[in-house]
Amino acid sequence: MRPSHEANVTQAARPIGVPDQTDAPAAGVWTLAGGRLIIAEPGGPATVLVPTEQVRLLAVDLPLSTRAKRLEALPFAIEDQIAEPIDSLHVALGAEIAPKRYLVAVVRHAVMAAWVDVAEEAGLGHAAMVPDALALPRPSEGQWAVDLGNERAVVRTPDGAGFAISAPLLRSAWDAAGKPPVVAYGATLPDDMLLAEGEIAPQPLATRLINPALDLRQGLFARRRPALPNLWRRLGWIAAVGAAAHIVIAAADTLMLRAIADRRAEETRTVAALAAPGVNLSGDFAASLADLLPSGSAAAPDLFLPLLTRVSGALGPVAGGLTVRGIGFQANTLTMDVEGSDAGLVGRIDAALRAARVSGQVTQSPDGAIRITARAA
């Protein structure tokens, strides 16, 4: 799989958002780069690959029985792993990647809306929208799958998630992750990056995306379905009328279940009062009851990769003039030592960090080395 910005363009420039073919596409895999769609592989399911740099991929524990319950609990399950207000983010639920553990994607509403507009204008409103890291096969435990390009590297991790990073920072991220064996799918990796012994058999890109691990087109940004012929439209109306009848019946059932739930809540309140005499159960009864239960420890959220991804993305405009000498991480602070010969490089790096709203500082030692210090929000 080639990175989205390196795909070949074989026709003259077209207006932004218009794909490189004359007819509106119905299928095929497309990459979104620079505000335009470029064909990556004809045939297969209609899919748009979007840059993973703008998507946060997480593996989240959701031990709930139904998808509806998982969606309801999702914002609370990820709130300590994100730095932005949840109302400004689009959160998409993906496949189960381990028992009761699910793949989750987080992207800004404004970014997602812009991507959907490009797809709609290009006739791909019905296409799935997948972060390009998930187009790589999921590697075995303890390995990385890496697609290295000229400017960026896309990584799929063994937990089913992944990330994208500036190509010069790949080796440092690999070192910080404990130098896992790598399965290479793009350009040849440096000789000192350990290759996995049993590589995954290659598959066409379209085949890997028949059933993607996650589709961003959910909820507010759900896919637009193609128009139905008249016959199917009529059948759709019939089905809608039947569904409406079922909704009326379900509403009646809901009222009955609510009455049962109120009765059982009163019974529970009585039992709780007997089990914990003297405890104030007024106000929010569910919260008061939860306070009586023993609480387990919660694992600290992973701060390194998200912070490294943000710093890497911020340094994209100046990455060509940088040589990374080392990366360190302690508590919530990332330190990166770099070298470069360009005049005014310290000011350019500082401006790039501020433009990306990364909290940090840039200092230069007398010997010319530059240290970047960034902190997680």
Image: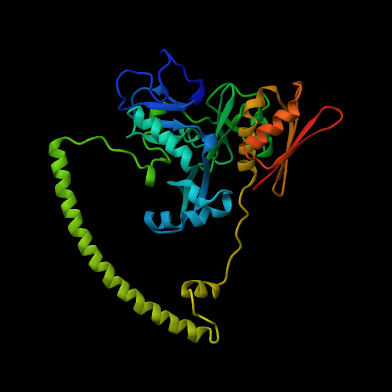
**Given the current orientation, which residue lies at the most extreme right position?**
366
> x, y percentage for residue 304?
65, 43
Q: Quadrant of residue 25?
A: top left
Q: Residue at x 74, y 21 (%)?
A: 342
| Spot occupied by residue 343 in the image (x, y as percentages of width and height) | 76, 22
Seen in the picture, residue 337 relative to 150 is either above or below; the reply is below
Chosen colour scheme:
rainbow
Which residue is located at x 63 percent, y 26 percent?
317
Taking the image as shown, residue 338 lies to the left or right of residue 320, namely: right
Tell me the quarter of the picture where residue 292 sits: bottom right
* Foreground residue among 92 and 358: 358
In the image, taking residue 243 as reference, residue 114 lies left or right, namely: right
Q: Position of residue 137 (x, y in %)?
A: 48, 34
Q: Residue at x 53, y 52 (%)?
A: 78
Q: Is residue 20 left or right of residue 318?
A: left
Residue 75 visible? The answer is yes
Q: In percent of the image, x 39 and y 41: which residue is there?
A: 217
**Total tally of numbered discs in the picture:** 0
Is residue 203 shown to the viewer in this render?
Answer: no
In this picture, is 73 found above or below 183? Answer: below
The quarter of the picture where residue 338 lies is: top right
**Percent of width and height locating residue 54:** 53, 37
Q: Is residue 210 left or right of residue 241?
A: right
Q: Is residue 210 above or below residue 219?
A: above
